[in-house]
Amino acid sequence: MTDVAGAPGTTDRADAPEPAGERRGSEALHFARRNPKLLIGSGIVLAFMLLGFIGPFFLSDNPNEYVGPQTQPPNGEYWFGTTTFGQDIWAQFVYGVRSTFVIGLFGGGVAFLIGMTVGFVAGYKGGIVDDILNMLTNVVLVLPAMVVLIVAIAYLDVRGLFTQGMFIGLSAWPWAARAVRSQTLSLATRDYVDLARLSGRRTWRIITTEVAPNMSSYLVMSFILLFGGAVLTAAGLDFIGLGPSNGVSLGAMLQSAVNWSALQLGMWWWFVPPGLGITAIVGALYVLNVGLDEVFNPKLREL
Amino acid sequence: MRMLRLPAALAALALAATACAGADGGDGGPGSGYPRGETLYTTGTAWSAPTSWNPMMRGGFAVGTIGLVYESLFHYDPETGEYVHWLAESDEWVSDTVHEITLREGVTWNDGEPLVAQDVVTTLELGQTDGVPYGNVWDYIENVEATDERTVTVTFSESRPQEWMNWAYSNPILPAHVWGDMSATDITDSANENPVGTGPYVYESHTDDRMIWERNDEWWATDALDMTMDARYIVDIVNASNDVTMGMLTQGEVDLSNNFLPGIDQLLNSNENIVSFYEGPPYMKSANTAWLVPNHNRAPLDDTAFRQALAHSINITEIVEGPYANLVQPANPTGLLPEWDAYIDHELVSEEGFSHDAAEAVAILEEAGYMDEDGDGFVETPDGEPIALTLEVPSGWTDWMEAARLIEQHAQDVGINITAEFPDQGLLDQNRNAGEYDLVINNARQLSNSPWTYYDYLFQLPIQDEQTTVNFHRYENEEAWQLTEELARVPAGDVEAAAEVTSQLQEIFLAELPVIPLWYNGQWSQANNTHWTNWPSEAEGTPNSAAVMWEGWYEMGGINTLAEIEPVG
Amino acid sequence: MWRYIGRKLFIYLLTFIVAVTINWMIPRFMPGDPVRNMLSRAAINDPEAMASMTAYYEDLFGLDEPLYQQYLNFWVSLFQGDLGISVMRYPEPVTDVIMGSVPYTLGLLLPAILLSWIVGNRFGAFAARSKALDNTVLPVGYVLTATPYMWIALLLSYTLGIVAGIFPTAGGFSYSLRPEFSWVFIYDLISHWFLPFLSMFLVALGGWAIGMRNMIIYELEADYSNYLQALGAPRRLIRRYAFRNAMLPQITGLAVQLGTIIAGSLLTEVVFNYPGLGTLILDSLENRDFFLLQGILLFVVIGVLIANFIIDIIYVLVDPRTRVQMTGGSS
């Protein structure tokens, strides 16, 4: 669930896109406004984000409270119905969406930082540093992340959002590192980078001022995919009961629906919304990502 | 099209491989499956793969080993409160300290040997081996003797009929010709793969997820008690998750489920085929009491006033109606099961019993000096120490976890800072036994022949470093323990004399509240009528016996239920 | 070519060493005192099991020995095939317990991976061909690939299993049957296998279709395609070239996606209570059977490495350029 490399738009392309620098600005904006994938994708993501971050202010502090009648299908008062105990599924859903974004930003962010650092350093430095980092990347890439995560997290006594995000980040970075590395490789030989190097600037400054900005679209897309991967991984961990203790999340909602036989009792309103939420958020991210790809890469605009 | 042939072949290959693996796991047996009309599928007794059939390994043997294969001298009928002669044909108390038991004629072990008095003698003598679970009978038995082929005379150094009869119906008689010369380690540790018993079933086969028993056509009770077992095979499936079990029950893959299934009330109301004992709430009879167990070695739980306040804070109705959806009933303040109603001193209970009353809880706390001086919303001890307690229930026990969350909330509402935690069951048991906890929920005592077992749990002394079965709360009250011992000495069946003692015990209990009774856990029993009918229910013309196959319940009606059910068609 | 394979093998060997090292490290460097914790947490009533576990751990952790010695001991017992005794299924060795579940997981994984890859590539290639198809395949593909495995499993279990009653929703085969080679049993086995298979197939399908579609569009915009088009080559021919070239990254993608699909199979098995490694993981989590858990990790890693190697060989066989690419240094 973390290796999203095979997901749309991330295949290791041999032909690096033109440096985005020249094209940034009005042209990209022009195409962005006309790209339905980008608009639909970002619309859905924004809507969920608003729901997750503003919604809880309109709801009670404890979405697990028994507030209503038990086992109610969706109705005017409880939009998503209630659980076996009379918990408001809408409230749980809103809080779940929030924690989905939190884990996505945090887990995806950690993976992004590691991936970016490793990728830049390997691609820019080259030589033995590259060889070692590349080997490390390949090794972590082959390891089945989910199983490693399960074993590692199983040993923890107390589980929080922070540890979960940290562990996900630590296992999800390799393909991003690989992508960043190959981009950096091609950029590192450009004239303006050579110029900067000759002027005696520090490596880090060159990377942050010359290399990174010229592949910013690429970085944004990597982050989006890492975000989606982290969300799916976290949902899987929550579902088997390795999520944050006492937290509310969409994966945990699925778990409790299964534990309390929602399927056998026909309580579809308990297990449909959380899965739909995850699918919508992650799916919208992917679509958004392809939209971005099309905006920044003119070759794809046709068809 | 060529491309599709390869995956198809691969798929077939994979399936064949799967089939092979499955075949390896099986234990052979007849060529086809078990005929549905002659096979009873049960679940709810086993938590792990069957590995032992040794009745001495309590908690370790495949459930059914005692009951289906090995049988006891008596059974006990909790409905009538009477002992039923089982392997014993008759018994007589010659004096206060001498019990003479005559065995049935014509009972044979499933290896063909007859049941003789020596078997009973050997069984009791095995109790002197280290590690045999009933060694404590020798605290009060002086001598056991086979007076003739079928008569056993047990002489007691101290008369404890209630305790002795509890042994006599819950412990199986073992064949002397098998167990007589076994080494001590074999007695307690061997897997006993081919159990030789007198009962209605014998071992057929097992895999990791099921235990299969086959009918013993030579069973003595077919003639003696006119009981016939229509089920030729009993397939007892190792517990799966709640939802899987519920799916199997609705689809008729399981005939009897003996687990708490959340939401089963909805199914009982909507599905004609799924039945339980009562038509409406609480649907099941009660099996045991769930208590909130405080650790008396930890302040402020050693303070009676604090425990009283805690007891008043808990809104049991919300627990019963919430997570349990009325599948259980709130417990009587004494905690004694409904079947023990005759032992409850109702007058005392109405005067001294507690009930949910948050205002009263606050008042008790204030009077005893528990105040919230630092304004954090939670009371401190009279000395000003902050109070922070944890309530632990095993992770994965979904109903108890929900109940614990509610208790946390109720207690916090009156200012008692309790947090619910869900550790692993093994860890919890270990910490509980060692006295390393604040509060737990426990239900370790089942319905039995006498409330003596209940008070034995509550008051047993002395307290050991490890309390493995009773008095987890580490409550020390010499007077209560003396009364409990006195209860053991009341003649079997003398309810009035026993009630006199239990009344005094209840007085102590209600005043001190060593543990806080919460609700009665049910005899979780939901059956599907599709393949087998005539399940016990409150309706006329159906059996009344317990339809649970848990360890210890075969002797309290389980066997009768098996004999009463009828195949469909 | 041999250099390429040799280099890959080296990476896999390294990965194996890292996996074993992680396995060794996790219980040692987690916060708290894991050995004591593990022993006290294991739900064992059986004193014999307890004793054997304590002995195993004392031997394995050799707490008074220096760390490097402990590490070496760990490898030695590994090479003796000793992964410990399962606590949950005491006294079965961990290896035996795992071997009992591996066929079920493989039986799900292999068909799901291969069929979804083949069908997905076909769909993707079709989609790239026409706008109308593209507009349907693409959204469906995105939805499928974004679906959490367990959710699609739940939906299928509810609709096809519980509501429609066509397929059983739990277990590997019926309790009324004994494993044997008969049509009844094989039919039963397949009907239990179908829904978990379908869940995995569907989720994986979306990813492959989109990947293929995108690759083909890249290829069609590549210089050689434009050149061919300028020369007046038939569209069919250009597309065939594009498809061939697009296959290669899809093969690599197979290796990269392996971890994700395995994770998916574990979750799917949990939903269907299918007796493979996923259900075993859940059971061992619930029973705190850490030997078993760690054993499963090693098994999965070995499986992934073997699969990767097979994919590498296929890649080499399909693409003669591998040699050239390897000297380019972008593995």
Image: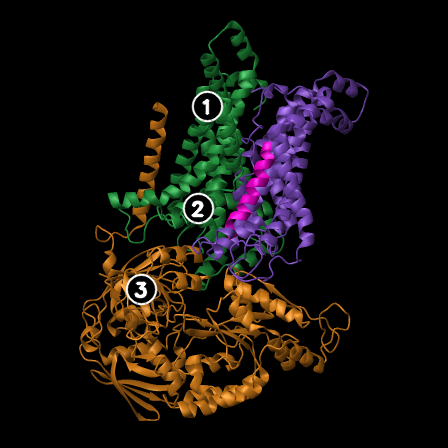
Chain colours: A purple, B orange, C green
Q: Which of C132 and C179 is in front in this view?
A: C132
Residue C141 x, y percent position in the rendering: 50, 32
Most distant residue in the front direction: A76
Q: Residues within 10 Å of mark 1 (few under 14, many from 20)?
A: some
Q: What residue type is labelled 3?
A: Asn
Residue A286 painted magenta: yes
Q: Mark 2 points at which residue?
A: C269
Q: For this view, does B132 lie left or right of residue B363?
A: left
- Taking B145 as reference, is B1 above or below it? above
Pointer 1 and pointer 3 on the same chain: no
Residue C265 painted magenta: no
Q: Distance between the residues labelled 1 and 3?
A: 64 Å
Q: For this view, does A301 lie left or right of residue B32?
A: right
Magenta segment boundaries in residue numbering: A270-287
Q: Name the residue under label 3.
A: B192
Q: Quadrant of residue B68?
A: bottom left
